[in-house]
Image: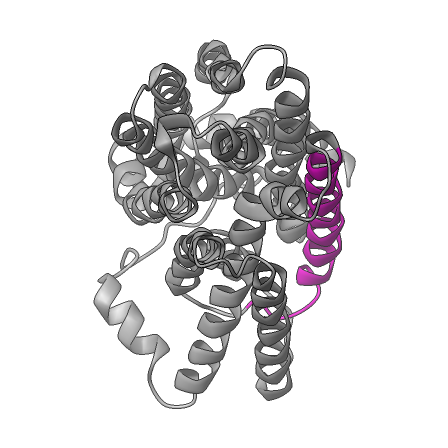
Amino acid sequence: MSARGSRPALLVVGLCWLAVLFDGLDMFIYGSVLPHLLETRTFGLTADQAGDLGSYATSGMLVGALVAGTIADRIGRKKLMVSCVILFSLASGLCALADSVTVFGLGRTLAGVGLGGLLPTAISMVSDYAPRGRGAIVIGLLMTAHHAGGILSAYVAKWLIDPVGRRAAFWVCVLPLLFAPVLAKFLPESLSFLVAKGRGEEARALAERYDVEVPAVRTGGAGDPWTNLANLLRGNERIQTLLHWVASFGGLLLVYGVATWLPTLMRAEGYELGSALSFVVVFNLGGIVGMLVAGRAADRVTAPRISGMGRFGAVFGPWLGGRLLASGNGDWGFTAFAIAGLSSMVFIGIAALRSPKHTATDSERELVGAH
């Protein structure tokens, strides 16, 4: 990383990294606590209900991601990030207090909305302050925080579940409330937001302070979402778009399905809870390596334009695992998730073979990173 981009990376990326770390902790804590919930029959929970609860959070994430852009355009990305941290922290408190599956499910849904709104907003924020030509690697670095949160969730569950109980794990997820004032005080506003709002002098002052360029004014706005979607399905773009959708669907099904059910599936195979949670650590370490490698590669190759259809895979994954366990076919869980991952690899390979090669622009990388 150049000296020119070191200061914004240390501040903006550092603050956003911590926010996404807490995002990952809150997202993955449910899967880490789930074996305890099922074994103790908390709320009278069954496997199929557990799968539904896992999908509530990812459904909330889908909603949060869909509305984040509109809200950020009104109030700014900084305020939205702070609001999302507050929302998913308070929602975790609701989960800690819950005495019924209904209240617990409401907490997980609200947490998902906050989680879904935070991630694309943080990606857009670091894209504004990333050194030119290094956007994808900075986004990849940011995304490692999500998996670092998954690793932290395993240790939180491992250290607290047996001696204290499941409520303590969710109370830990309330602690990011203490980080919200820090984020509000030290995180600068998005340069793109300031430019779009006609606050050019403020944007130039921030750009000079953090030694980055002021983003160009985007003419014509983001456009109608239905028009943008239609453009992705026209002519030669149609097949490429469908291939990327299917690949993204399978990839997110794998990630969020495994994130929810890996400890439970390992317990079913006879592993102790601590050993089962160790697999969560290994799974997320692999994710960190993958993000760094992919981020480096994405700075050199084409960043395809897709929409967020693949996010439905994140909703389907936890539900699928629950249905397999409830029907007595838990042994098929690993097989189902593996098939999803392999299918994604095939489809993305086909898409790559059909794509013309060119160097990705920063705007393309930001678009892809947000999804």
Figure quadrant of the N terminus: top right
Q: How is the image coloured?
A: one colour
33 lies left or right of 280: left
Instruction: Using the image as rendered, state which of residue 188 and residue 92 is in the foreground.
Output: 92
Task: Give the answer, above or below, for where 72 lies relative to 311.
Answer: above
Instruction: Using the image as rendered, state which of residue 66 and residue 193 is in the foreground.
Output: 66
Residue found at x 72% / y 54%: 290
Residue 183, image x and y in percent?
49, 18
Q: Residue furthest front?
A: 328
Residue 220, image x and y in percent?
27, 59
Task: Give the answer, above or below, for where 361 lies relative to 128.
Answer: below
Total marks in image? 0
Residue 10 appears in which quarter of the rendering?
top right
Residue found at x 75% / y 55%: 293
Instruction: Using the image as rendered, state which of residue 218 and residue 36 is in the foreground.
Output: 36
Residue found at x 55% / y 38%: 126
The magenta stretch spans residue 279 = yes
Residue found at x 59% / y 25%: 18
- The answer to whether one can see residue 71 in this image is yes
Give the magenta range. 275-303
Q: Overall secondary structure of the magenta stretch?
A: helix
Residue 194, image x and y in percent?
36, 34
- The answer to whether one can see residue 356 in this image is no
Residue 321, image x and y in percent?
49, 55
Task: Give the answer, above or below, for where 46 lies relative to 359.
Answer: above
Instruction: Using the image as rendered, state which of residue 44 and residue 176 is in the foreground.
Output: 44
The magenta stretch spans residue 316 = no
157 lies left or right of 97: right
